[in-house]
């Protein structure tokens, strides 16, 4: 089981061991996947004993940290519980872009997005409609793990019409194997290096994309981008772990000179400035603002997840012309947060305090916008 699995559920290793034992004898009619590696012009972090690492290791320097009154009640949030903000709906201003990009998107909650490209291609980013794969979900429930509410707007239709699915990394809140069946074998799957081996053999077309390497879907160029995170899915003490054996990524979409960037799960580091140096200022930035809070391990959570103020700093580094935050909400997984909308509460407080001139577009789950 991954570190995310542990942080979400409080499960012990015996639950993961039970899940693996339950699944060990399960097989399906195997059809070999079609796997290729896209590495031209790309960057692959160094492998040490088969494990990847971040570009900038060690303690990070954060431009700003909210230290007091970080979660004031906001009139833009209509909440069932105002403080800390829970079960809210945003009713504030909705800025747009001066120059149209041709992209449209729908946020399904947590990290899941549907993207329509200017030439009409349908993309899914980190689509997750359930919590854990079977039998891990069964073991999780059996041993008292809390359930999460699935994103309500991500249904069979979204999966079936996808031309491509982009995954950022292996953690359960970003990758669910049962959703692969809903997509089928006709779409392309773009993943970071090392992730293809986690797909069941069902004839899927999978491309492992190095950081800064690119793939074309229709007329849209899609590049893998650096992120500052970690990766794992299974852990059984003294027997097996897959920590950092697959890489983690963000994704950049480019069409007609316009760009859309999805950061993936990431902490703040100089990799954002590296991205700006390679690709220039970005039109639309989808940046995470949640999963940073913990009573005793807050420094570690922040190391691999951006706080709202870190996301604002990243938006400056990237030259974002529009910032769309994600990770909060009623249908998020809720790990590392005070409440469902506390990260958004904090973002709204920090946004004017940092003198931002980047338009901030806040979505409620299920909302669609054309940009």
Image: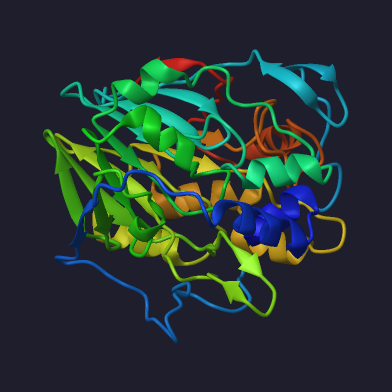
Report the front residue among 308 and 197. 197
Report the front residue among 39 and 85. 39
Report the front residue among 85 and 34. 34
User: Residue 222 is drawn in which quadrant?
Assistant: top left
User: Residue 304 at x, y = what percent?
Assistant: 60, 61
Residue farthest to the front? 25
Q: Residue at x 74, y 34 (%)?
A: 147
If the image is split into quadrants, where does the C terminus sit?
Answer: top left
Q: Is residue 281 visible?
A: no
User: Residue 1 is drawn in which quadrant?
Assistant: bottom right
Report the front residue among 35 and 149. 35
Q: Residue at x 25, y 36 (%)?
A: 185
Q: Is residue 52 above or below residue 356?
A: below
User: Residue 152 at x, y = what percent?
Assistant: 57, 18
Q: Is residue 315 above or below residue 93?
A: below
User: Residue 29 at x, y = what percent?
Assistant: 33, 44
Q: Is residue 347 above or below residue 79?
A: below
């Amino acid at each position: 089981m991954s570190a995310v699995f542990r942080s979400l559920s409080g499960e012990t290793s015996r639950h993961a061991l039970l899940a693996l034992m339950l699944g060990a004898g399960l097989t399906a009619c195997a059809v070999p996947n079609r796997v290729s590696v896209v590495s031209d012009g790309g960057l692959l972090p160094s492998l040490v004993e088969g494990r990847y690492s971040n570009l900038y290791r060690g303690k990070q320097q954060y431009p700003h940290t909210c230290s007091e009154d970080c979660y004031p009640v906001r009139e833009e949030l209509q909440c069932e519980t105002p403080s800390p903000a829970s079960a809210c709906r945003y009713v504030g201003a909705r800025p747009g872009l001066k120059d149209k990009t041709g992209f449209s998107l729908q946020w399904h909650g947590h990290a899941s997005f549907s993207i329509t490209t200017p030439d009409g291609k349908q993309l899914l980013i980190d689509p997750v409609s359930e919590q854990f794969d079977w039998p891990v979900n069964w073991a999780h429930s059996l041993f008292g793990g809390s359930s999460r509410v699935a994103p309500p707007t991500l249904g069979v239709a979204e999966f079936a019409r996808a031309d491509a699915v982009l995954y950022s990394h292996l953690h359960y809140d970003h990758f669910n194997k049962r959703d692969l069946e809903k997509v089928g074998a006709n779409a392309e799957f773009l993943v970071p290096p090392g992730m293809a081996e986690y797909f069941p053999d069902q004839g899927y077309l999978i491309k492992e994309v190095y950081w800064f390497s690119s793939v074309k879907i229709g007329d849209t160029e899609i590049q893998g981008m650096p992120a500052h995170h970690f990766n794992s899915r299974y852990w059984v003490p003294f027997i097996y772990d897959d920590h950092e054996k697959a890489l983690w990524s963000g994704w950049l979409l480019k069409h007609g000179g316009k760009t859309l960037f999805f950061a993936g799960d990431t902490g703040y580091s100089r990799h954002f400035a590296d991205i700006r140096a390679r690709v220039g200022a970005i039109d639309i930035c989808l940046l995470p603002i949640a999963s940073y809070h913990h009573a005793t391990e807050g420094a570690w959570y922040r190391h691999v997840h951006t706080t709202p103020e870190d996301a604002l700093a990243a938006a400056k580094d990237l030259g974002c012309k529009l910032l769309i935050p994600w990770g909060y909400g009623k249908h998020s997984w809720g790990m590392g947060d005070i409440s469902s909308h506390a990260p958004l509460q904090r973002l709204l407080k920090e946004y004017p305090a940092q003198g931002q001139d980047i338009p901030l577009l806040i979505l409620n789950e299920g909302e669609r916008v054309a940009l």
